[in-house]
Amino acid sequence: MAKYHIYIFRHGQTYYNRDKMFTGCKDSKLTPKGKKDALKIAQKLKNKKFQVAYQTHLSRSKDTLKPVLKYHPECRKIITDDRMLERCYGNFEGLHHSTIIAKYGKAMFDKWHRAYDFPPPKGESVKTVEKRVRSFIKDLLAKIKKDKVNVAISAHGNSMRPFRRYFEKLTIKQMMKLENPWDDYFEYVVDF
């Protein structure tokens, strides 16, 4: 039985993150701090080995992965997979959190922002995100087993929650309390 490693990290801070705006599927760029976050992740992963890297189509995922890859000539393949994409916030994308709180109240904001099965108008619930992330995990584990590879994943905050729930055996309540850092990674080991 061989052990394989999964290194997953959140993209660096974006302008929307910094300004407390709902980002979702909008393509917000990394701030100067976000670029430093990416460099910190690259340094922390410098001595790890992986042959495949995953990103989403959004620039924040790609731009966080780029400095990481500079230390990994052994990485033979980069795969873009949007099942790890950030949660869609629908009508709220591009709006400041304070705007939603002023219009609907803090209780409704909290429900839309942190409830497992309560999507914002025309957006996704975390339950929906978890369904697509579980599909990604199933295919990821099959690929690791078949190709015998370690992988790195440049993900998003809300797609990392169900990923961590799966590998850390968390409850929904525990998962919903998770905060994923912009400048660190999580490592999981699977054996086949």
Image: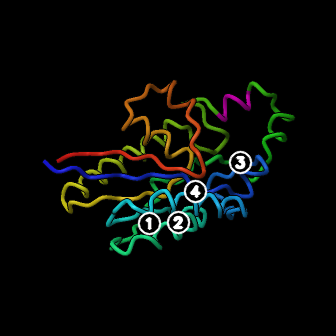
| Picture disc at residue 22 | 3
The residue lying furthest to the right in this view is 102
Q: Are marks 2 and 1 in contact (CB under 8 Å)?
A: yes
Q: Nearer the viewer, residue 34 or 147?
A: 34
State the residue position of label 1: 80
Within the magenta stretch, is there residue 96? no
Q: Amino acid at mark 3?
A: Phe
Q: Quadrant of residue 37?
A: bottom right
Point out the frontmost of discs 4 and 3: 4
Compare marks 1 and 4 and give the one earlier in the sequence. 4
User: 10 Å neighbourhood of mark 3: few (<14), some, or many (≥20)?
Assistant: many
Within the magenta stretch, is there residue 109? yes
Which residues are the magenta region? Answer: 108-113
**SS for dot 1:** strand
Compare marks 1 and 3 and give the one earlier in the sequence. 3
Q: Amino acid at mark 4?
A: His
Q: Quadrant of residue 102?
A: top right
User: 10 Å neighbourhood of mark 2: few (<14), some, or many (≥20)?
Assistant: some
Q: Residue, x 69% and y 57% (percent of image)?
A: 14
Residues under labels 2 and 1: Cα distance? 6 Å
Q: Is residue 63 left or right of residue 5?
A: right
State whether residue 22 is above or below residue 34. Answer: above
Point out the frontmost of discs 1 and 4: 4
| Picture disc at residue 57 | 2
Tell me how many marks there are. 4
Residues under labels 1 and 3: Cα distance? 23 Å
